[in-house]
Image (cartoon, rainbow, N blue to C red):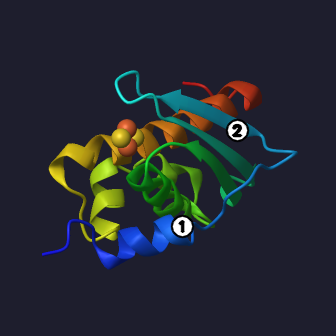
Amino acid sequence: MALYSEKVMDHFRNPRNVGIIEDANGIGEVGNAKCGDIMKMYLKIEDDIIRDVKFETFGCGSAIASSSMATELIKGKPVSEAMKLTNQAVAEALDGLPAYKMHCSVLAEEAIQSALEDYRKRTGKEG
Ligand code: FES
Protein backbone atom coordinates (compact mmCIF):
# COMPACT_ATOMS: atom_id res chain seq x y z
CA MET A 1 0.00 0.00 0.00
CA ALA A 2 1.25 3.45 -0.81
CA LEU A 3 2.25 5.47 2.20
CA TYR A 4 0.13 8.43 1.10
CA SER A 5 -3.32 8.33 -0.42
CA GLU A 6 -3.96 9.76 -3.85
CA LYS A 7 -5.90 12.58 -2.24
CA VAL A 8 -2.94 13.54 -0.08
CA MET A 9 -0.70 13.55 -3.14
CA ASP A 10 -3.24 15.54 -5.14
CA HIS A 11 -3.64 18.23 -2.47
CA PHE A 12 0.12 18.34 -1.94
CA ARG A 13 0.89 18.75 -5.64
CA ASN A 14 -2.05 20.97 -6.40
CA PRO A 15 -3.02 22.72 -3.16
CA ARG A 16 -6.30 24.65 -3.13
CA ASN A 17 -6.65 28.15 -1.69
CA VAL A 18 -2.99 29.01 -1.34
CA GLY A 19 -2.17 32.64 -0.67
CA ILE A 20 -3.22 35.50 1.52
CA ILE A 21 -6.41 37.53 1.88
CA GLU A 22 -5.57 41.23 2.11
CA ASP A 23 -8.78 42.18 3.92
CA ALA A 24 -9.08 39.06 6.04
CA ASN A 25 -10.99 39.53 9.29
CA GLY A 26 -9.62 36.42 10.96
CA ILE A 27 -5.96 35.40 10.85
CA GLY A 28 -4.35 32.54 12.71
CA GLU A 29 -0.80 31.32 12.78
CA VAL A 30 0.37 28.17 14.48
CA GLY A 31 3.49 26.07 14.51
CA ASN A 32 4.77 22.76 15.68
CA ALA A 33 7.88 23.15 17.76
CA LYS A 34 9.11 19.62 17.05
CA CYS A 35 9.12 19.68 13.26
CA GLY A 36 9.30 23.45 12.87
CA ASP A 37 6.40 23.63 10.43
CA ILE A 38 4.31 26.79 10.36
CA MET A 39 0.80 27.35 9.06
CA LYS A 40 -1.08 30.59 8.58
CA MET A 41 -4.80 30.83 7.82
CA TYR A 42 -6.72 33.82 6.51
CA LEU A 43 -10.50 34.01 6.79
CA LYS A 44 -12.91 36.44 5.21
CA ILE A 45 -16.15 36.12 7.13
CA GLU A 46 -19.38 37.90 6.25
CA ASP A 47 -22.76 37.32 7.86
CA ASP A 48 -21.19 34.48 9.84
CA ILE A 49 -20.28 32.62 6.66
CA ILE A 50 -16.71 31.79 5.61
CA ARG A 51 -16.78 33.56 2.26
CA ASP A 52 -13.11 33.00 1.55
CA VAL A 53 -10.20 31.20 3.11
CA LYS A 54 -6.55 31.03 2.13
CA PHE A 55 -3.43 29.60 3.68
CA GLU A 56 0.33 29.76 3.66
CA THR A 57 2.14 26.70 4.94
CA PHE A 58 5.83 26.39 5.47
CA GLY A 59 5.96 22.72 6.08
CA CYS A 60 5.85 19.13 5.00
CA GLY A 61 3.69 17.64 2.27
CA SER A 62 1.12 16.35 4.74
CA ALA A 63 0.83 19.80 6.30
CA ILE A 64 0.26 21.34 2.88
CA ALA A 65 -2.32 18.69 1.95
CA SER A 66 -4.03 19.09 5.35
CA SER A 67 -4.24 22.86 5.03
CA SER A 68 -5.58 22.58 1.51
CA MET A 69 -8.25 20.05 2.51
CA ALA A 70 -9.17 22.01 5.63
CA THR A 71 -9.83 25.15 3.58
CA GLU A 72 -12.02 23.15 1.22
CA LEU A 73 -14.00 21.75 4.15
CA ILE A 74 -14.86 25.15 5.65
CA LYS A 75 -15.21 27.36 2.58
CA GLY A 76 -18.78 28.63 2.27
CA LYS A 77 -19.74 27.13 5.63
CA PRO A 78 -21.14 28.92 8.68
CA VAL A 79 -18.67 29.86 11.41
CA SER A 80 -20.43 27.48 13.81
CA GLU A 81 -19.65 24.56 11.49
CA ALA A 82 -16.02 25.60 10.95
CA MET A 83 -15.60 25.67 14.73
CA LYS A 84 -16.39 21.97 14.82
CA LEU A 85 -13.75 21.00 12.27
CA THR A 86 -11.41 18.41 13.73
CA ASN A 87 -8.11 17.09 12.54
CA GLN A 88 -9.72 13.65 12.25
CA ALA A 89 -12.21 15.07 9.75
CA VAL A 90 -9.35 16.58 7.74
CA ALA A 91 -7.40 13.31 7.79
CA GLU A 92 -10.49 11.29 6.84
CA ALA A 93 -11.26 13.62 3.95
CA LEU A 94 -7.71 12.94 2.75
CA ASP A 95 -8.38 9.17 2.96
CA GLY A 96 -6.05 8.93 5.91
CA LEU A 97 -2.56 9.95 6.95
CA PRO A 98 0.21 7.78 8.36
CA ALA A 99 0.07 7.80 12.18
CA TYR A 100 3.27 9.77 12.53
CA LYS A 101 1.84 12.41 10.20
CA MET A 102 -1.41 12.95 12.10
CA HIS A 103 0.09 15.98 13.85
CA CYS A 104 0.17 17.72 10.45
CA SER A 105 -3.64 17.59 10.35
CA VAL A 106 -3.71 18.86 13.95
CA LEU A 107 -1.83 21.91 12.75
CA ALA A 108 -4.59 22.60 10.20
CA GLU A 109 -7.29 22.32 12.87
CA GLU A 110 -5.35 24.62 15.17
CA ALA A 111 -4.69 27.19 12.45
CA ILE A 112 -8.39 27.42 11.64
CA GLN A 113 -9.42 27.59 15.29
CA SER A 114 -6.83 30.31 15.88
CA ALA A 115 -8.14 32.34 12.90
CA LEU A 116 -11.72 31.93 14.16
CA GLU A 117 -10.65 33.12 17.59
CA ASP A 118 -9.00 36.16 16.02
CA TYR A 119 -12.27 36.86 14.19
CA ARG A 120 -14.24 36.60 17.44
CA LYS A 121 -11.83 38.99 19.15
CA ARG A 122 -12.00 41.51 16.34
CA THR A 123 -15.76 41.45 16.20
CA GLY A 124 -16.33 41.25 19.93
CA LYS A 125 -18.07 37.90 19.53
CA GLU A 126 -15.92 36.31 22.14
CA GLY A 127 -17.60 34.18 24.68
FE1 FES B 1 5.23 18.61 11.14
FE2 FES B 1 4.09 17.73 8.96
S1 FES B 1 5.97 17.07 9.81
S2 FES B 1 3.47 19.39 10.18
Relative to 115, is 81 above or below? below
Q: Residues within 10 Å of mark 1 (few under 14, many from 20)?
A: some
Q: Earlier in the sequence, mark 1 or mark 2?
A: 2
Residue to which mark 2 is pinned: 26
| Residue that protrudes farthest toward the right in the picture | 23
In front here: 24 or 96? 96
In front here: 79 or 26? 26
Q: Residue 39's x, y, as percent?
A: 55, 39
- Residue at point 52% right, 70% down? 13
- Residue at point 54% right, 24% down? 127
- Residue at point 87% right, 46% down? 22
Q: Residues within 10 Å of mark 2 (few under 14, many from 20)?
A: many
Residue to which mark 1 is pinned: 72
Tag 1 secondary structure = helix
Q: Residue 113's x, y, as percent?
A: 50, 37
Seen in the image, is 40 located left or right of residue 92? right
